[in-house]
Image (spheres, grey):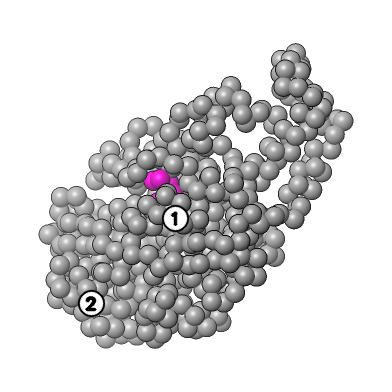
Amino acid sequence: MFDDPFDPAAHPLGCTCGAHGGTTRGLACEPAGTEAGAASIVDRAVTRAIFRTERRRRAFIGLVGKATAAAAVASVFPLAAARAAFAQAPRTIEKRDVKVGFIPITCATPIIMAHPMGFYAKHGLNVEVIRTAGWAVIRDRAINREYDAAHMLSPMPLAITLGAGSNPIPWTMPAVENINGQAITLANKHRERRDPKDWRGFRFAVPFDYSIHNYLIRYYVAEAGLDPDRDIQIRAVPPPEMVANLRADNIDGFLGPDPFNQRAVFDGVGFIHLLTRELWDGHPCCAFAVSREFITQNPGTYHALLRAIVEATAYSSNPANRREVAAAIAPQNYLNQPVTVVEQVLTGTFADGLGRVQRVPNRIDFDPFPWHSMAIWILTQMKRWGQIRGDIDYARIAEQVFLATDTAAAMRDLGLTPPATASRTHVIMGKTFDPADPEGYLNSFAIRRS
């Protein structure tokens, strides 16, 4: 409890924040903006006040041991009360003018609608939401500090932290934006080729290499016996360009976000083969992401942003609000789509391009809680397909990047009820994933790169 976070000896596993001299890939300390970081600040302040000098503190701990030292301090100072008071104290918003980048897809609904519907302003922020062309641009602008926070795909903060596809930089995902909300869309010429076993030679688009879309299409075709690296082609295409590529016959289909699945139907160039909720109901897709550096330097701004996002997510999740939200995010400066297309996605009543009108209320939903078990599943797929290698501390990385504790605190602040735990089993294509045994799960696949 009383380890000094600026003491390298207190961090044998190291970290990636740069302050502690550690080198272990993918691990980082708790920033000041998190509950654990706040408790650490209080503990350090109390111990330094009691012992006056670092030499005395170290000497005392060396003499009696850490456990006895902790008990001794607790006996003379109400640490628990101090932590609680610190956590509940009003936070200063260090930076009111904030830039948040987003991709124009319905996955970003809470990030987008929080602007025109006043959720950012309610929490004391002046946020500029910036429409961005593609995921690599989002990543690069966020890393270069052109954006203070960003709409990212759920695997991206993990990849950035681990240095997959970029230099390793400690990144976090305080909130999931949407669950479900994706589909496999095929060109109309493939209406009679609905069995993935018949897709050898198909060319598919996904939004980004580090995306739930990439992992789900790979999983889906591999379960049908096709090797996704040998039997089909998978290429990264920015979501706004997917329909045009389908129309031009550059691709046979895509596993992508809405509204572009529905737009392909609307334009008469494709049909919805299946919704991804049929592969994994409740899967994460996009997220609200921010660097650890930003949290450390602007903890008040970070918490205000997180509360605004969580509140906007809860509002978007209510079916009674979906048409209002659709009207708010459809305009040119946001999604630039016909309102009817966005409504079909958000309400779940939609034409599928096969002559049917489907009614699937949870075609897309919005749930901010970043389950650690979801992060662990993503890490297994990153390793399965060779994006990361070697020994992976799955649970530690998940906890460091998916900030479930912060999200739970924000949910409670807003009168919402967070889950009691950050881990659970998930069922993907009928197969149960146990986050306690990621390597066993990974080794159960016949088709994999690692």
Residue 215 location, quadrant: bottom left
The stretch drawn in magenta includes residue 158 = yes
Say which amino acid is labelled 2: Gly
Q: Is residue 155 visible?
A: no
Q: Secondary structure at mark 1?
A: loop
To which residue does mark 2 refer? 270
Looking at the image, residue 230 sits to the left or right of residue 23; the answer is left
To which residue does mark 1 refer? 146
Looking at the image, residue 303 sits to the left or right of residue 433; the answer is right
**Front residue of 178 and 19:** 19
Q: Position of residue 254 (x, y in %)?
A: 25, 66
Q: Is residue 118 visible?
A: yes
- Label 1 and label 2: CA atoms lie apart by 36 Å
The stretch drawn in magenta includes residue 28 = no
**Front residue of 353 and 146:** 146
Q: Main secondary structure of the magenta part?
A: helix
